[in-house]
Image (cartoon, rainbow, N blue to C red):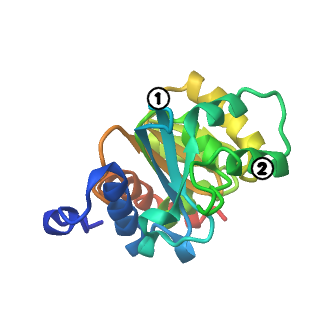
Amino acid sequence: MKSLWSDREAEEFRGDLGLRVYTSRLLGRDKSLVLHGGGNTSVKIQEKNLFGEEETILYVKGSGWDLETIEPQGFSPVRLAHVLRLAELPALSDPEMVNQLVTHMLKASAPAPSIETILHGLMPQKFVDHTHADAVLSVSNTKDGEKRVREVYGKRCVVIPYLMPGFDLARLCAREFKRQSTSETVRRKHGWWYRTTSPPEGSVPMNKPISDASSPIPRVARSF
């Protein structure tokens, strides 16, 4: 994979949210990473609220926005503290989860937060990328996908079985993240997650895992 990062272009984007917009667009340009505009990204930013108190805001891609063309207003600003409290509940229906996220945004006019917002919040790193990389899916979507993912990546990533995006998935990931400490995650039949403390240079963090996943594809294809 070739990095699409340009220092000249990056200089046009200010602040953490600006860089999140730019790096999200870089991911969106690569069609081997984001199928039909899919995938989502986020950034955690310290801000002062109306009362002058510092709080962490999770800016997560809003529903209906395409990564390739996303603007700052395409990110939903959700109070991270409330997101993390939701993750501690023993159960939560998806409709109520959506309601809780929407009612704890900073801007009433912002788009509805991604259904995977709690999952973004659970990852402590500042920047989180989630893509549907073709190469990774070609390995993880096989009948014995977890075994094949381990053959490719070993223990460098958390492997999550497929669950529909929502609260149950967030709870499972919370448990597995505590058990397996790593910056990379593969969700079977869904995609790849990468998280970092500094702005990822577009697809650069994806280069090695996707190259690794591409190597066994011909052998995996014969296993179907």
14 relative position to 212: left or right: left
* 12 vs 121, nearest the viewer: 12
Q: Is residue 24 above or below residue 167?
A: below
Q: Element under label 1?
A: loop
Q: How many marks?
A: 2
Q: Position of residue 172 (x, y in %)?
A: 70, 35
Indicate the secondary structure of the residue bearing disc 2: helix
Report the mark closest to the observer, 2 or 1: 1
Residue at image position (64%, 37%) is 83
Residue depicted at 61% across the width and 48% down the height: 105
Question: Residue 90: image x %, image y %?
Answer: 82, 27
From where the camera sits, is residue 95 visible? Answer: yes
Q: Which one is in front, 183 or 219? A: 183
- Dot 2 or dot 1, earlier in sequence: 1
The residue drawn where x is 75% and y is 51% is 98
Reply above or below: 36 against 190: below
What number is the disc on residue 217? none
Q: Residue furthest front?
A: 51
Q: Quadrant of residue 85?
A: top right
In the rendered view of the protein, which quadrant contains the N terminus? bottom left
- Residue 130 makes an appearance in the image: no
Crowd around label 1: few <14 · some 14–19 · many ≥20 (10 Å): few
Side (left or right) of 34 relative to 161 = left
Q: Residue at x 69, y 44 (%)?
A: 161
Which residue does the numbered mark 2 point to in the structure image? 99
Say which quarter of the image contains residue 44: top left
Residue ID for mark 1: 53
- Please state the horizontal and vertical placement of residue 86, each as a whole percent of the image: 71, 33
